[in-house]
Image (cartoon, rainbow, N blue to C red):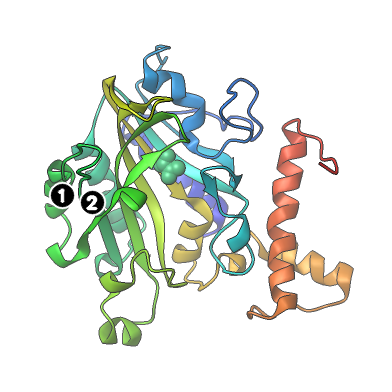
Amino acid sequence: MTSAAIRQQFLDFFKEKQHTIVPSAPIVIKNDPTLLFTNAGMNQFKDYFLGNKTPAHRRVADTQKCLRVSGKHNDLEEVGVDTYHHTMFEMLGNWSFGDYFKKEAIAWSWELLTAIFKINPMQIYVTVFEGDEAEGLPFDQEAYDEWARWVAPEHILKGNKKDNFWEMGETGPCGPCSEIHMDCRSEAERSQVFGGALVNADHPQVIEIWNNVFMQFNRGKDGSLTPLPEKHVDTGMGFERLVRVLQNKTSNYDTDVFTGTLKVIGELTGKTYTATDSRQDIAFRVLSDQIRAIAFSIADGQLPSNT
Ligand code: SER
């Protein structure tokens, strides 16, 4: 499947579940002083979560251009050094604004990955928020129970506030989340070392692909958590990582999202990309990642300068 076909299948799946498909917001943020660039699919919907605006549709899906180069969500130092972080990436998302909640979000994530994309369930691990005493937040039993309908118990892991409580920035909408991780190692490796032990451990072949956030709170300037007027769903799937999984590659850069750019960099520099950890190959990956980030930022109205 080409990356374009994969993107379309995601959108079609949620369209069938009565979601309205909406365009990506610009990567450059114009009207929110708490952010410079769009860092998540939910940014454009922030006012719906906070109850400041009423959405035209209560179920929405899209693919959002995101940039994570500073602030709370910053992947800049990983880019190119590893094979699965990006400055700019596409985030596939489905949203419920006060409509469905954990049950449907979890069931549909599972259906899309295993029934439509035919991913082997034994290669999937999910995480659930373990709770946080200092914040007065309980273990997410509801998410656990919904996952338990589909996923083997040893593939459901508990995670702490750092990994399983998602926040937009220092302030703003937030809530417990369930991440979906893929174990992309070979069958032989999987039978030797239990994949659950490698989740969230920086293993290059055991990577998060999708996050389901259950928006329930607003983080105030004083650090307090206030319940939102309604409960919402915000999911974000890393498009480039999903493509890598479905195209059966061990690096995002080996998918059709990047191979064309890598080829042109090779032609312009007279060098060859060999997909190793060498400094030259890291440079290839950095260039192919960042030319995309720069092109889209300029197209969305941000001109580069020396500052
Ligand atoms: N907001 C969550 C994230 O960025 C899910 O979309 O990971």
Which residue: 50% across, 30% down? Answer: 43
Q: Position of residue 79 (x, y in %)?
A: 62, 61
Q: Is 63 drawn above or below residue 219 in the view shown?
A: below
Label located before the other in sequence (2 or 1): 2
Mark 1 surroundings: few (<14), some (14-19) or many (≥20) residues within 10 A: many
User: Between 117 and 182, which is closer to the camera in this rendering?
Assistant: 182
Residue for badge 2: 128
- Gap in angstroms between the C-alphas marked 2 and 1: 6 Å
User: Between 178 and 201, which is closer to the camera in this rendering?
Assistant: 201
Q: Is 234 drawn above or below residue 178 in the view shown?
A: above
User: Between 205 and 268, which is closer to the camera in this rendering?
Assistant: 205
User: Between 151 and 49, which is closer to the camera in this rendering?
Assistant: 49
Mark 1 close to ligand 1, CB under 8 Å: no
Q: Position of residue 182 (x, y in %)?
A: 36, 64
- Residue 10 in view (yes/no): no
- Residue 186 in view (yes/no): yes
Which residue: 49% across, 59% down? Answer: 241
Asked which secondary structure carries label 1, the reply is helix
User: Which numbered tag is attached to residue 144?
Assistant: 1
Q: Position of residue 4 (x, y in %)?
A: 56, 50
Q: Position of residue 27 (x, y in %)?
A: 64, 35
Q: Quadrant of the C terminus?
A: top right
Asked which secondary structure carries label 2, the reply is strand
- The amino acid beneath tag 1 is Tyr
